[in-house]
């Protein structure tokens, strides 16, 4: 689990959805992310693995960035490539309904 600390990742949870951010803490099914965003819906990728490799289309719906988030029920953690991270951090504006 320590290998993920400090890395930008995609996190899937049981009931809180899918998030991206930098892992600050990871212990079993609990994760604290910093510089985190929630992915509400996405286009341009079929799976979370693809999101972690290539990012998303700009038509995807992501939240604003929060300083940190405490997630429970973590079932998947996937490290992102630099390309995906750039797209997820600055390439997609926060969704405004």
Image: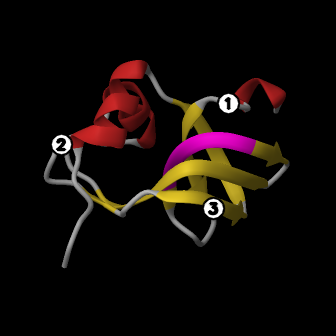
Residue 30: % across, % down: 78, 56
Q: Which badge, 1 or 2, comes first in the chain's sequence?
A: 1
Q: Is residue 45 visible?
A: no
Q: Is residue 6 visible?
A: yes
Disc number at residue 69? Answer: 3
Tag 2 secondary structure: loop
Bounds of the magenta segment: 19-24
Please rate how many residues cluster around mark 2, counting C-alpha atoms within 10 Å: few if below 14, some from 14 to 19, many from 20.
some
The percent coordinates of residue 60 (x first, y second) are 22, 54
Residue 7's place in the image compared with 20, above or below, is above
Between 33 and 79, which is closer to the camera in this rendering? 33
Q: Earlier in the sequence, mark 1 or mark 3?
A: 1
Find residue 41 and report its image quarter: bottom left
| Relative vertical location of residue 32 with respect to residue 50 in this rendering, above or below | below
Q: What secondary structure prevails in the magenta region?
A: strand
Residue shown at 19%/79% (left/top)? Answer: 97
Residue at mark 1: 6
Residue 9 place in picture, x, y as percent: 55, 37
């Amino acid at each position: 689990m320590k290998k993920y600390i400090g890395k930008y990742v995609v996190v899937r949870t049981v009931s809180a959805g899918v998030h991206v951010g930098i892992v600050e803490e990871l212990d079993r099914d609990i994760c604290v992310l910093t510089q985190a965003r929630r992915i509400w819906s996405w286009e341009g990728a079929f799976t979370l693995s693809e999101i972690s490799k290539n990012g998303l289309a700009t038509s995807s719906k992501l939240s604003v960035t929060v300083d940190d988030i405490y997630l429970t029920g973590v079932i998947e953690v996937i490290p992102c490539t630099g390309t995906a991270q750039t797209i997820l951090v600055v390439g997609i504006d926060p969704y405004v309904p």
